[in-house]
Image (cartoon, grey):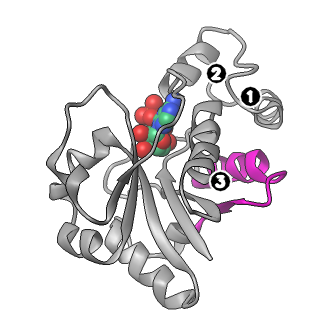
């Protein structure tokens, strides 16, 4: 089974994330996408970052009706701050028969050389990249483990969603209906 890991703070998860994940399944040989929710970094308490529990709950609700999507809170119990290479190593060891790879925007690929043990990531894991941020071609796109795939990108971000709510407006259709109901019910981001 080939699993693509899509990391994010998902504060909150939105339709852009979901369209992207579905495109990854459509355009690559991946069988599943796991949405890996980033934990709170205890050293960087970010204003506006909702609790791990709420962010994970919303991801779980958003992906529940799709057999090929899974919400993962695996990083909550790993040492913090979490480094992608450590999470990959942990998962590869725990799920021996699965093949893990990364899904990331081209904007992130540009910064990959700053990640912990990025050479090991590139050597042992495939990376599926989607165009984002209008970047120029990047040399890493030539790497044998890096594959570019096309995806329709919705120009929305979690920041925009939080601002919309703060302004007293609706985020219906920007997030799945169940997530919208959760946000309204819990009164979050107001
Ligand atoms: P924020 O606005 O709070 O920074 P975000 O919407 O960018 O949040 P993250 O949870 O940080 O969301 O995103 C997880 C991953 O999804 C990141 O790699 C990010 O680049 C990507 N992503 C975010 N929004 C979109 C979108 N509209 N289309 C495709 N990918 C997206």
Task: Classify mark 2: helix, strand or loop.
Answer: loop
Label 3 CA crowd tier, 10 Å (few <14, some 14–19, many 20+): many
Is 165 located above or below residue 89 in the figure? above
Splitting the image into 4 quarters, where does residue 116 fall? bottom left
Task: Classify mark 3: helix, strand or loop.
Answer: helix
User: In this image, 29 relative to 61: left or right?
Assistant: left
Give residue 164's position: percent from left, percent from top.
59, 14
Numbered tag placed on residue 148 in the rendering: none
Quadrant of the rendering where the C terminus is positioned: top right
Give residue 72's position: percent from left, percent from top.
62, 64
- Name the residue rendered at 49%, 73% in the picture: 100
Label 2 CA crowd tier, 10 Å (few <14, some 14–19, many 20+): some
Does residue 77 appear anywhere in the picture?
A: yes
Numbered tag placed on residue 190 in the rendering: 2
Q: Name the residue beneath numbered marker 1.
A: 187
User: In this image, 109 relative to 4: left or right?
Assistant: left
Q: Which residues are magenta?
A: 52-73
User: Does residue 126 belong to the magenta stretch?
Assistant: no
- Name the residue rendered at 64%, 17% in the picture: 165
Label 1 CA crowd tier, 10 Å (few <14, some 14–19, many 20+): few
Q: Is mark 1 within 8 Å of ligand 1?
A: no
Is 157 located above or below residue 121 in the figure? above
Label pair 1/2, CB-CB below 8 angstroms: yes
Q: Is mark 3 within 8 Å of ligand 1?
A: no
Give residue 91's position: percent from left, percent from top.
50, 80
Callout count = 3
Mark 2 or 3, nearer chain start: 3
Quote the CA–CA distance across marks 2 and 3.
Answer: 19 Å
Quote the CA–CA distance across marks 1 and 3.
Answer: 16 Å
User: Does residue 65 belong to the magenta stretch?
Assistant: yes
């Amino acid at each position: 089974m080939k699993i693509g890991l899509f990391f994010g703070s998902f504060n909150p998860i939105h339709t852009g994330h979901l369209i992207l994940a579905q495109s990854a399944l459509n355009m690559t040989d991946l069988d599943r996408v796991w949405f890996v929710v980033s934990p709170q970094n205890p050293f960087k308490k970010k204003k506006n970052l909702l609790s791990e529990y709420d962010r994970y709950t919303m991801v779980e609700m958003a992906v529940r009706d799709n057999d090929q999507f899974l919400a993962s809170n695996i990083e909550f119990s790993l040492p913090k701050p979490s480094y992608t290479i450590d999470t990959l190593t942990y998962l590869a060891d725990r799920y021996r028969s699965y093949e893990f790879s990364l899904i990331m925007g081209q904007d992130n690929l540009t910064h990959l050389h700053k990640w912990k043990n990025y050479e090991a990531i590139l050597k042992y894991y495939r990376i599926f990249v989607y165009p984002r941020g209008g970047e120029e071609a990047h040399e890493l796109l030539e790497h044998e483990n890096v594959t570019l795939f096309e995806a329709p990108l919705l120009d929305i971000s979690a920041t925009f969603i939080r601002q919309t709510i703060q302004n007293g407006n609706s985020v219906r259709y920007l997030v799945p209906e169940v997530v919208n109901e959760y946000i309204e019910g819990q009164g979050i981001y107001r």
